[in-house]
Image (cartoon, helix red, strand yellow):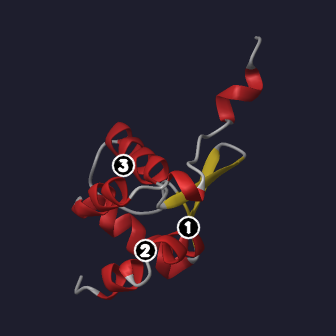
Amino acid sequence: MSGMGTATALEHPTREDIRIEAVLHALADPVRLRIVQAVADCGEMACGVLDLHVSKSTLTHHYRVLREAGVIHQRPVGTAKINTLRRDDLDALFPGLLNGILAAPR
């Protein structure tokens, strides 16, 4: 198959392309907020680790929204995607936002 390498390539916005509107939209959903809190707690986490009581396709959508907003970085490892929080980028662009979000009662 041609283009095999592109199937695993994931698009991430550059720091300059991260917009507050997209970040706030991504963080406004309770499932995505739970994902962000869990990734922040763990440092890095595979997509399927949390039991969020949503379908696999819905979970994939939530991770994609977070990635495309610039909240998380995903890297493929075998068949899994490992997620890390883009804390440095978010802290540089929106100082205090992430700390406030993560400090909110769960």
N-terminal label among 1 and 2:
1
Q: Residues within 10 Å of mark 1 (few under 14, many from 20)?
A: some
* Labelled disc at residue 94: 2
Question: What percent of the width, then of the height, locates residue 42?
Answer: 54, 78
Identity of the amino acid at label 1? Arg
Residue at (59, 40) in percent of width and height = 11
The quadrant of the picture occupied by the N terminus is top right
Q: Do the residues labelled 1 and 2 touch (CB within 8 Å)?
A: no
Residue 24, placed above or below residue 105 = above
Which one is closest to the eye, mark 3 or mark 2? Answer: 2
Residue at (26, 85) in percent of width and height = 104
Question: What percent of the width, then of the height, locates residue 65?
Answer: 39, 47
User: Which residue in the structure is indicated by mark 1?
Assistant: 86
Instruction: Classify residue 38 as left or right of residue 81.
Output: left
Instruction: Classify residue 14 as left or right of residue 61.
Output: right
Q: Nearer the viewer, residue 5 or 47?
A: 5
Cα separation, mark 3 vs mark 2, equals 22 Å
User: Which residue in the structure is indicated by mark 3?
Assistant: 62
Instruction: Classify residue 29 as left or right of residue 103.
Output: left
The quadrant of the picture occupied by the C terminus is bottom left
Residue farthest to the top, as pictured: 1
Q: What element carries label 2?
A: loop
Q: What element carries label 3?
A: helix
Identity of the amino acid at label 2? Phe
Residue at (43, 74) in percent of width and height = 94
Identity of the amino acid at label 3? His
Residue at (49, 51) in percent of width and height = 67
Residue 55, placed above or below residue 47 = above
Q: Which of 14 and 41 is in front in this view?
A: 14
Cα separation, mark 1 vs mark 3, equals 16 Å
